[in-house]
Amino acid sequence: MQQLVFATNNAHKLEEVQAKAGDKIKLLNLNDIGCHDDIAETGLTFNENASLKSHYIYQKYKLNCFGDDSGLEVEALNNEPGIFSARYAGTHGNHEGNIDKVLEKLKGIDNRKARFRTVISLIWNGEEYFFDGIINGTIRTERCGTAGFGYDPIFEPDGYDITFAEMSMDEKNRISHRGRAVDLLIQFLKIQA
């Protein structure tokens, strides 16, 4: 079984990706390799932030690894919150505040088109590869559902009449932005095996 470091300590993300990877790949998080450093996301794009994470781990630990950056892009808000999705309301991880800010900014706006986007930067034997996943949808006017995390309670993917927060993890993983990017990552890793 291949081991691969996921440059995160986000248990939700790790669980989602491990569910996709199955028993082909053993994912390790930052705690598993003894990394307690705060890897700054100072990039201006999803690609740059994902790359900062993977390069940091590879340079320090010389382990095959990947980092990701994800976010919500709302068309009517000039693709905000974008790379600031996790800290849109000012504090990193303030999911309720972030949702409130998006809903407030969209008051009275008919265009509720949005997309979730994930970029994965994989460093495999010293080479960097990128994998991109996107899911289009709309922003609801109020929260629905209790599963998932982040903006899941207000994001309704195209072709569905429920939010991510109303889906099971399996259902969300099949269609989500992260799921799509991870599928591409896993296809790549199977070729390398």
Image (cartoon, helix red, strand yellow):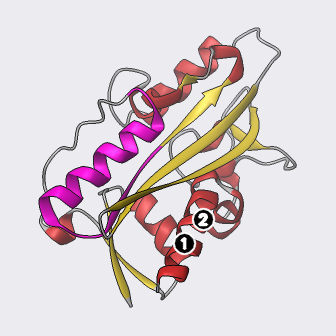
Q: Quadrant of residue 6?
A: bottom left
Question: Element under label 1?
Answer: helix
Residue sitting nearer the eye, 43 or 158: 43
Residue on which disc 2 sits: 184
Residue 69, x across and y down, in percent: 44, 44
Task: Answer above or below: position of 70 versus 25.
Answer: above
| Magenta-highlighted residues | 44-69
Amino acid type, callout 2: Leu
Amino acid type at circle 1 is: Phe
Residue beneath disc 1: 188
Quarter where residue 48 is shown: top left
* Magenta stretch contains residue 113: no
Front residue (pair 131, 165) = 131
Q: Is residue 48 left or right of residue 82?
A: left
Q: Residue at 19% x, 65% y: name it.
A: 31
Residue at (22, 60) in percent of width and height: 58
Classify mark 1: residues with Cα within 10 Å, few (<14), some (14-19) or many (20+). Answer: few
Between 84 and 152, which is closer to the camera in this rendering? 84
The relative height of residue 34 versus residue 98 in the rendered view (above or below) is: below
Classify 68 as above or below 85. below
Q: Position of residue 2 (x, y in %)?
A: 37, 85
Q: Residue at the location (84% across, 50% down)?
A: 160
